[in-house]
Amino acid sequence: MDVWGWIQANLLDSTLLMVFLIAVLGYLVGSIKVCGLDLGTAGILLVALVFGHLGVSVPGLVRDMGLVCFVTAVGFIAGPKFFRNFKKNAKSYILLGVIIIGAGALSCVAIVKLIGVPADLAVGMLSGALTSTPGLAAAIEATGSDAAAVGYGIAYPFGVISVVLFVQLVPRILHTDMDIRHKHKDLFYCDSMGFFSFACAIVGGMILAKIKIPLPGGASFSLGTSGGPLIAGLLLGHMNSIGRLSVSVPKNVLETMREFG
């Protein structure tokens, strides 16, 4: 048996080995700085794409667990200011959301009409460019084609890398302090690390994810694995406590869970 054959037989089939090997190599790639900016966690995505091309695959449970941890952490991090800012600037946020989604949708239609890209591939690319996993699920369901997943894979790296670089630049330009979480010494904490609160958000989020709202034409809408935990994280992050029970999670734990996801 040659070396590559031995690797395929003994290493590529080990899910744990592959996941953490991709993480090791991805962090090395992500740590490379160019003009003070780096890819960070997006480096892992690029390495994972290469490994996927080589035939490495992981069970759906690994993907779902990572996704849930990531979006729940993001919800907790954004929660303390999300609803407060939304109440003050609701019109601006809604308008911004409509413009972003509308611009993406119009670009997608233009590509289909002018360049002749197949519609199923184009809607997948739209979902990938917006880094919307629920959008991909809707695209696959609507088109019934695996080409949507291919388009998603093509555009997703560019969407993620753009967002990673953008969110690193904006706080530097605006000189914004992102640490807004405070602890209140009179509340009851089930555990010092906040895993109780984090798990509660995931449980609540997964329940929300299972709720399906019927739409005209026999279709249905649901928040999905990414939307449900995100909403639950936003709510608990905003509330910070239920009565005297703390539902907050320390910032360092949230950052760790986000990176883990």
Image (tube, rainbow, N blue to C red):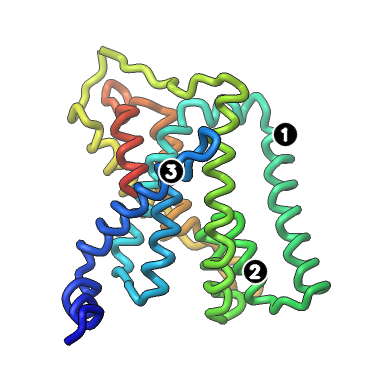
Seen in the picture, residue 13 relative to 106 is either above or below; the reply is: below
Give whichever of discs 3 and 2 has the lower sequence position. 3
Tell me what residue is drawn at x 50 percent, y 60 percent: 133
Give whichever of discs 1 and 3 has the lower sequence position. 3
Q: Which residue is mark 1?
A: 91
Give the number of the mark in front: 1 or 2: 2
Across and down, in percent, residue 75 comes to 44, 39
The residue closer to the viewer here, 187 or 10, is 10
**Residue at the outermost top position:** 185
Seen in the picture, residue 123 relative to 25 is either above or below; the reply is: below
Give the number of the mark in front: 3 or 2: 3
At mark 3, the secondary structure is loop
Whole-angstrom CA distance, mark 1 to mark 2, is 27 Å
Tell me the amino acid under the disc marked 3: Ile
Q: Which residue is mark 3?
A: 32
Q: Is residue 193 left or right of residue 109?
A: left
The residue closer to the viewer here, 232 or 155, is 155
Whole-angstrom CA distance, mark 1 to mark 3, is 39 Å
Across and down, in percent, residue 123 comes to 65, 69
Tell me what residue is drawn at x 16 percent, y 75 percent: 10
Tell me the amino acid under the disc marked 2: Val
Tell me the amino acid under the disc marked 1: Lys
Q: Which residue is mark 2?
A: 123
Tell me what residue is drawn at x 34 percent, y 35 percent: 254
Give whichever of discs 1 and 2 has the lower sequence position. 1
Across and down, in percent, residue 62 comes to 29, 61
Give the number of the mark in front: 1 or 3: 3
Q: Is residue 97 left or right of residue 35?
A: right
